[in-house]
Image (cartoon, rainbow, N blue to C red):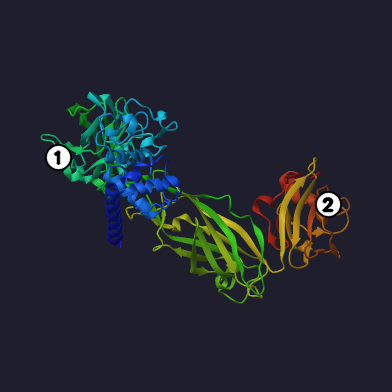
Amino acid sequence: MSNLKSKILLGVMIVAVLFVGAFALSNVASAEECTVTTFMKVGSVGADVMCLQTKLGITADGAFGPMTAASVKAFQAQNMLVADGLVGAMTRAALNVATTTTTTTTTTTTTTEDLCPNGMTLASNCTVAATTTTEDLCPNGMTLASNCSTAPTTTSTTLVGGAGDANVAHYGTGEKNEIVDGDSDVKALGFKIEAIDSDISVSNVKIQIENQETATSSSRLERYIDSVDIYKGSTKVGSADASDFTKTSGTIAYTKSINLSNAIVRNGDKDPFYVMLNAIDDFDTANLAAILEVSLESLRFVDASGFAMTLDGDTASTNDLAVNDAATNDGADVKSSSNNPDNATITVDANDTTDDVLALAFKFDVDADSSDITLTSLPITLTIADAALPAANDMAETIIDSVMVKIGSDEYEAELTADDTTDALNGGTAVYTVDLIDENVVFEGNDNLEVKVYVTFAANDTDYSENTTVTASIDISEIEAETANDDTFTFGGVDRTGAVLTLNTVGANVSNTHWTINSTGTIVDFYFTVEADTDDFDVLAADITNTIAGTMVTLSTSGTPETATPGFGLLSRYSGDSVTAIGSTGFTVSEGDTTTFRVRYSVGSDTTTAAVAADNGGWLEVTITSVAGQTVPDEDQTSATATVNL
């Protein structure tokens, strides 16, 4: 198809050229009557377009369309201009000149100023003359040669000046000090070439590469390098395969004069050049002690007068690169994520799944100098604890509908690969694994990629108990990955654990757990907030698991801290929506309401508290591990130290 398009375009261009020729023979008079004065492109309309079309010998309808563009390109190619179809200053000058010179029998009285804009010369297709600045013709920092587009450097291959010279100096900015197998575009050496008294064209550079440590490593260049590129700034101007380098007689050094193209340095400029190495895919272990010295031996250039000269390389233009196995630089850690969820109560449905609950979030943080790391297997462990083990033993499949892992923006389904949840009463585990062998999940140097684990819970129609908990975690030693050389890779960092998710069909969420203590240290308060989502929810004193100095104590919902048995806790509503008392056993929070409760401990001189605190020298702490069947976060379970007045 591309060949057909090329043939069609060529045919259009030929037709356009024939039209131009036909116009030159039969329509000269009408073409002379107009002058092309404005920039035009596809989409332009008006009198100037009609003038342009008249000069090109095509239908003058005043609309710049594809046929007009093809004719412009043909005219530009015929006049050695850039065939871009844009009617810029040079194209306009050539069009107007072509018309004038076709009908004029002599041009002896015509100056270049008559044919081109001020400061330009016809001999170079109306390009900027040497003594004219671009500011004379275009806005600051722009050039007429590209229709007043931003172009800080010229692409012209014409050398300006006369007899010239050059200097070369080492340029170490950005040079690397090591090369690893599989690396490409390693900046091994930099140097600057200065053009003196004339533009110069650098025709070749002679590069030498030598292993400085041959006691245990090979001197052969092809054991390390596949090819060498020469760049002028960011543009590649030359290249050679390692096999093209020649071993210098009597030495272990390899040299090659690499031919360059369009490597022009303008008079007075100092342009940077770089030697870029492309390593072979896999270094032999025996060669990892090698040190490659890269140096510029000489360069050859031509000045504007056409005189060719050779310049010896700067003696300082040398750089050493240590040869290393890519695996030695490979590094990535498993790190925490700010999106890792807090412990929470998840309201599960009795008749439908509860979808995509975030259970764990962490990050893969890859070292900046690491080669590519391919992730092949990511196992997620779910720890399941059922408060009252039901008859069913397959707890993972009973509770978990599916597990989905999101790596960056890509999602992957995890499969159940190990189920040891028959003892879920004491915390069984199920492993869900994402098989990534065929997924091409590749981490590059400096990547910092977040991973999120989502769990969809099965419907709970008494298949599992209220307040069953599920916690997701990863063991970094179980993650499987490979380096760029197919070596096994082990992640650093630490194992990560997600939220404790408490499953409840009642639809209540316990949150905002925290402690306070009075100034004398004799009154300790525990606060928690209950939000009843889908039904009324009972907060019972008996469902608050609490101990004082390791001894279980009984809570009360009546009386005051001063009259309650010292050392025993008092449960009461503290703030928020009103509640309904359930005798002396607790309170009911109505559906849709949110209430904050307080448990107050007044520690005094009673014999019970004294006995509890005797072994602690008069000091004790209060601990609450669960409220309404929901686990209190570890950091909120224990109070500050209270004082017992013995």
Q: Which is closer to the viewer, label 2 or label 1? A: 1
Percent coordinates x, y for residue 549 in the rendering = 72, 51
Position of 425 relative to 473 (above/below): below
| Residue 246 numbered tag | 1
Position of 128 relative to 430 (above/below): above
At x 83%, y 50%, the residue is 606
Give the farthest residue toward the left.
249
| 102 sits left or right of 530 in the view | left
Look at the image and tell me in which quarter the C terminus lies: top right
Asked whether residue 114 is in view, the answer is yes
At x 79%, y 61%, the residue is 593
Percent coordinates x, y for residue 24 in the rendering = 28, 47
Judging depth in this view, the residue of 234 and 623 nearest the camera is 234
Judging depth in this view, the residue of 492 and 297 nearest the camera is 297
Q: Earlier in the sequence, mark 2 or mark 1?
A: 1
| Residue 566 numbered tag | 2
| 600 sits left or right of 239 in the view | right
Which picture quadrant has residue 271?
top left
Q: Describe the element under mark 2 as helix, strand or loop.
A: loop
Percent coordinates x, y for residue 138 in the rendering = 42, 33
Amino acid type, mark 1: Thr
> Callout 2: few (<14), some (14-19), or many (20+) C-alpha neighbours within 10 Å?
some
Judging depth in this view, the residue of 302 and 451 nearest the camera is 302
> Callout 1: few (<14), some (14-19), or many (20+) C-alpha neighbours within 10 Å?
some
Asked whether residue 319 is in view, the answer is no
At x 58%, y 52%, the residue is 339
Judging depth in this view, the residue of 316 and 326 nearest the camera is 316
Amino acid type, mark 2: Pro
